[in-house]
Amino acid sequence: MFRSGRKYQHLVHNTGCGCASPLLQQATSRLGEYSRRHFLRSIGATAVAGMMPLSAGAQSSVAPGKILLRQARLFDGKSNTLQQGTQVLIDGNRIVSIDRSNNPAPADATIIDCGDRVLMPGMIDAHWHSIYAAVPLNILSAGDPGIIFATSTAEAERTLMRGFTTVRDLGGPSFTFKQAIDSAIIPGPRIFPSGAMITTSGGHGDLRMPSEIPSNGGQLSVSELMGAAAIADDVGVLKQRVREQLLQGASQVKLVGGGGVSSPRSPLDISTFSQEELSAAVEVARDWNTYVTVHAYAPRTVQRALAAGVACIEHAHLMDEETARLFADKGVWLSMQPFLTMDDAASQSGPALERIKQLFAGTPKVYGFAQKYGFKVAWGSDVLFSPQLTPRQNVMLTHLANWYSNADTLRTATSVNAELLAMSNLRTPYAGKLGVVEKDALADMLVWDGNPLDDIRVIEDPQNRLSVIIKDGRIFKNTL
Ligand SMILES: [Zn+2]
């Protein structure tokens, strides 16, 4: 269908005058509509194609019953220390009791003896791209949904097997993909979807090919048809695009306030949406009882978003001291990615490489500001377009130990990130508490062979050190 979309481009360009005849417009708008529907059907078909036996990685997704985890040392997601000799009972997808009494197990419970290993809440990545993390840019640009969704399906299972039971998705066509995971058709983490990232022309996320510029009337670009991006250059269209993401099930709205690393034509210093436009998006999100988060690097971009009343900023690696103070004054979240070395950015080259070096320099500065001014910082890995980098998701987390205690690092990936997720308010896709092991919380849990409170690097080797993975009361891995 993308091929037909491109054909349409040629037709329009070949008219020579740059404006299509009414007849051609009619024909091509039908073609565009056909393309869009065909694409959505393709996604559905891909999801159904996922109804296959689980691979060896994820052991089980049978309907949840009762599970008793015995003899665990518990990190509950909040406290500094481990609670020895704990047992946790799961019924369905909830934690129903936590005690040290060694009560006899219910007759119908599956028993897992943790043997004094460390039990903790499933981890949360607050900035993830379910569809694009492992899809190389050249495959993405070709736009064939079959290979894109096959790749992201495999990656979703690997994400879960690394101990990430929830991700906040910051851009990409993840709505039906999320449904496939929630319905246990394919294994993967819970997804808090944003849908398409909403940008102006020329902002990060405007992934149009040269042949798609200038835009032509109502014609959508390939990346817009895919649901990767939505381009809006005035308030009316912007509000419409925001509402379109919400009606498809967005739990929060992602706006792009400026340039980015992996978008070669959008330098980091630029600002895109005006304050008026950002405020309009905030108003729509509030009407839907959720929030807007804005991708922003430069101080001007960040400050404009803060003035518009957004609840969260993504990145902000170039922030200055004045901007840091504003985060604290306004109580706004920063969703931060600790990019430190080239190992965190293996897939970058050209202008992107120069930009990511600016991020490396900004990372320690931002964590310094966060500690000085005490604003709220969530953690995310933001791996993009690279099957080589996705296994580093856990290492991106342990980078936090450069500035935080091991307990704080674990808290950030659990209860702190869960606090940010809770900002989705009435648009949260999952009723129940995440990021903690406590009575009535959702049953997402990990058991580590080793104590990450003593040695955070345990987290870096989930394949060998992660003994148990439970999500939504279902056992996906159990080597005990
Ligand atoms: Zn991102």
Image (cartoon, rainbow, N blue to C red):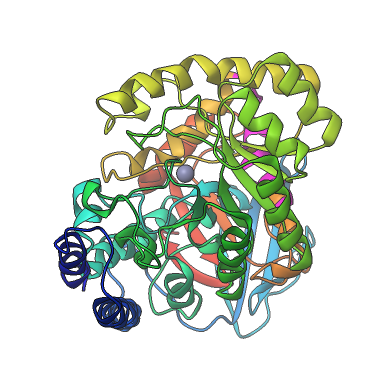
- Of residue 319 and residue 163, the one placed in the foreground of this image is 319
Residue lying at 15% horizontally and 62% vertically, measured from the top left: 10
Residue 274 locus on image (x, y percent): 64, 41
Queried whether the magenta region covers residue 407, the answer comes back as yes
Taking the image as shown, residue 391 lies to the left or right of residue 2, namely right
Tell me the chief SS of the magenta region: helix
Residue lying at 77% horizontally and 40% vertically, measured from the top left: 79
Confirm whether residue 436 shows in the render. no
> Which quadrant of the figure has residue 54?
bottom left
Taking the image as shown, residue 121 lies to the left or right of residue 54, namely right
> Which quadrant of the figure has residue 94?
bottom right
- Of residue 366 and residue 110, the one placed in the foreground of this image is 366
Residue lying at 71% horizontally and 54% vertically, measured from the top left: 280
Residue 401 locus on image (x, y percent): 57, 24
Confirm whether residue 111 shows in the render. yes
Residue lying at 68% horizontally and 67% vertically, measured from the top left: 428
- Of residue 58 and residue 261, the one placed in the foreground of this image is 261
Q: Which range is magenta? A: 403-419
Residue 91 locus on image (x, y percent): 67, 78
| Quarter the C terminus occupies | bottom left
In the rendered view, would you say 391 is above or below 355? below
Residue 93 locus on image (x, y percent): 64, 75
Queried whether the magenta region covers residue 283, the answer comes back as no
| Quarter the N terminus occupies | bottom left
